[in-house]
Amino acid sequence: MSDKALPESLTLEQFESAVAELREILGQDRVYTDDINELRAYRDVYATTKDELHMPSAAIAPESVEEIQKILAVARKYVVPLWTISTGKNFAYGGPAPRKAGYVVLDLKRMNRIIEVNEKYGYAVVEPGVSYFDLYNYLQAKKSKLWIDPAAPGWGSVLGNLTEHGAGYTPYGDHFLMNCGMQVVLADGSVVETGMGSASTSNTAHLHKYGHGPAVEGLFTQSNFGIVTKIGIWLMPEPPGYRPYMVTFPKEEDLYQITEVVAPLRLNMLIPNAATTVGLIWDACQRVTKKQYYLGKGPAPPSALKKIAEDLNIGMWNFYGALYGPPPLMDNNWKILEEAFRSIPGAKFYFEGDRPDDPAWKYRAQLMQGIPNMAEFSIMNWVGSGAHIDFAPRSPATGEDAMKQFTTIRDRAHEYGFDYIGEFLVGWRELLDVFMLVFDRTDDEERQRAHECFGKLIEDHAKLGYGEYRAHLDFMDQIAATYSWNDGALWKMHHRIKDALDPQGVLSPGKMGIWPESLRK
């Protein structure tokens, strides 16, 4: 490794001294510096930019809070920037790669204990390295009657997804909302328990969120103010009944009425889980590739999309939902839902057993039942050597806003030669559009186009008043700049908090556009 890969404030000699001290703390087998055999795993295989822009100088894997405290002492001594990850599986938003070259990845994958599962009160307490698969398998082995709420890729970290404001598909799908209790290590090595957990004799740390005084958990989500080492998360008791359903719609313009129908049903909890309207290609990728229907350049034409819909018996939009509870309650609720959906011409209904050979149905039905899987990665097969970055703006949950988002993204994607692959989710009161920008990672020119397209989408949506709720590593500063009300007052406050809690800027400098004073431009 050359000193050109290091931050300007850190010499190669200083870095090597820091690594030597880290080896004393962790041992040889948990400090990684070999660029070919060890550090390659910490690069984003889906990056639209060059590897050297996201090349860590080392990676380290502690197993305890005590080791993290000792690591932080070394980081402060040499001013080594640490980039914290839980499992490094966040490939929709930049993967495990650090924000800039020269960082040391603080990999918490070995901190993978399921500390507690409380069957009576319905919660779990986990460390960062616990994946959805881990927690699900643990509950299954214990014959637990609790459900998890997994994000679509089951290999992701429960803690990591929650702290990045991730979501799932059961009624417990708002993951940060289900957080209760958090342990954080600050840059100076202090360990903080939040909420009721801060009371020395507390027995309600994971039962009541707020405790006494300001609730601070949110400060440690999507930020670089501390290292979250433990969370409590509420789990859903297994309901007495579960019925997934799918409704297909034949026209692109149906999105308007679907959203108008779904939003009040979601608000009134007749649809209790993530109300998801999925575009045709997203579902089709589970069974077919683009080349089977279109060999030309650019986005697949309407004729190809129509043929795919006919062959796979799916719509231009496909709505997935589920009923939960006693059968009489589900029966009554379905009468209301069916009447509402039938108001949209061409709606077709499917239930358990109607689509036995449809993998898209299977993985959606599993997610809404709290069963993690990896099926969504089939979308990468659409273009062969596929890669993706996800654009995820939020808007009001109206038909007008849904169509505005869809047409804006579709037209911009087509301009740059990409297909629209997206889904819309109605949350509590807002609409989330997840656009998966899929490109060929082996084609440098296509990667560059994808990068430019993504930047344009940020500009487009800022003008429309739609803010993106997560940020890809390469676009964190650009997205942060769109939150500009009152001369960027919110980000100025973020910077002040950063300067107070981490004045040397050793914790993930630049994450979400939050920089220490020494690195601010």
Image (cartoon, rainbow, N blue to C red):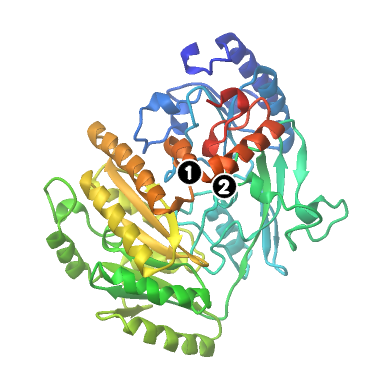
Q: In which quarter of the image is residue 196?
A: bottom right
Residue 57 rendering spot, x and y as whole percentages: 51, 22
Frontmost residue, 423 versus 284: 423
Residue 306 rendering spot, x and y as whole percentages: 16, 65
Q: How many labels does the image show?
A: 2
In the image: residue 284, left or right of residue 495: left
The answer to whether any part of residue 73 appears in the image is yes
Q: What element carries label 2?
A: helix
Q: Determine whether 394 is above or below 143 in the image.
A: above
Q: Determine whether 309 is above or below 445 in the image.
A: below
**Circle 2: residue type:** Gly
* First along the sequence among labels 2 and 1: 1
Q: Which mark is residue 266?
A: none
The answer to whether any part of residue 2 appears in the image is no
Q: Determine whether 27 is above or below 146 in the image.
A: above
Q: Residue at x 19, y 53 (%)?
A: 290
Q: Which residue is drawn at 33% across and 60% down?
A: 404
Residue at which label 2 appears: 160
Q: Residue 89 carries which label?
A: 1
Q: Residue at x 68, y 47 (%)?
A: 230
Residue 84 rendering spot, x and y as whole percentages: 58, 36
- Mark 2 vs 1: CB contact within 8 A: yes
